[in-house]
Amino acid sequence: MTSKRKRLNLKEKIDVLKVIEKEKLSVRRLAERFHVGKTQISELLKDKEGIRKMWVLNSNENLKTLKFRKIETSEIDEVLMKWFRSARAKNIPVNGVLLQERAREGGESLGSETFKASNGWLEKFRTRHNISFKQICGEEKSVNPNEETDWFGKLKFLLKGYDDRDIFNADETDLFYRVLPELCLEGEKCSGRLRNSSCNWKS
């Protein structure tokens, strides 16, 4: 059984660079030697100068846990925001708990063993990307544009012979069995104009 891949700390990244200078190994061989993925080695090679500068600034030879928090956070943010935009484009409700779960999955996929999507992290993530809780409303995404056009024509025909006072809206009845959350993290406008409502009768 193969051992779980890890994220290299700063000293280990310097060790990789030293091996490259001495042995000229391929990315695959380096990944095998240091028990990490090839992607991590490739990223390391692209940022050699940055790693060396960081090592000079942090001259402690025994540094074992520094994992470039800013880079790690940036990577997780990128993965999470891609998923978030996709979910909102489909008008899927996204609340804080779901966002934290996706963030943890993203951290694991990037090989991070220390990342925890805490409530504090969630607040900072929302601040970084200007995301706020917002009420999901409307049915815009669920309506076929062609059906909407046809309905306007039918509606005019159906309303003939009725006074305005005899026309009322009774389009929805509330049903909350396993309902998705109404509050969501939203970075865009709320689609549609109808809010969740019970039958509204006019006498």
Image (tube, rainbow, N blue to C red):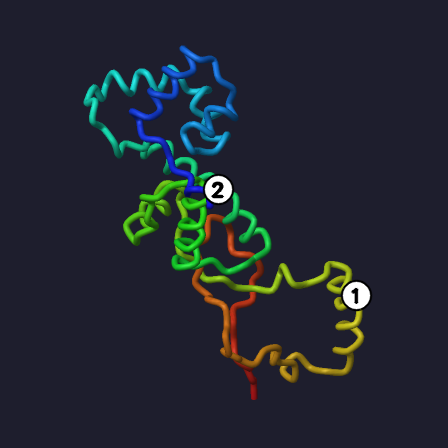
- Residue assigned mark 2: 79
**Viewer-proximal residue among 156 and 181:** 181
Occupied quadrant, residue 99: bottom left
Residue beneath the point at 29% across and 20% down = 54
Residue beneath the point at 79% across and 72% down = 154
**Label 1: few (<14), some or many (≥20) within 10 Å?**
few
What is the x, y in percent for residue 179? 50, 72
Between the residue at mark 1 and the residue at mark 2, the CA separation in whole angstroms equals: 41 Å
Q: Is residue 6 left or right of residue 160?
A: left
Are discs 1 and 2 less than 8 Å apart at CB? no
- Residue assigned mark 1: 150
> Where 131 sits versus 203, above or below?
above
Q: Is residue 184 left or right of residue 122?
A: right
Residue beneath the point at 79% across and 65% down = 150
What is the x, y in percent for residue 149? 76, 62
> Where 104 sits versus 32, above or below?
below
**Viewer-proximal residue among 37 and 181:** 37
Q: Nearer the viewer, mark 1 or mark 2?
A: 2
Element under disc 1: helix
**Label 2 sits on what residue type?**
Val
**Label 1 sits on what residue type?**
Asp
Numbered mark located on residue 93 in the image: none
- Residue furthest to the front: 1
Quadrant showing the C terminus: bottom right
**Viewer-proximal residue among 85 and 12:** 12
> In this rendering, does residue 196 appear at all?
yes
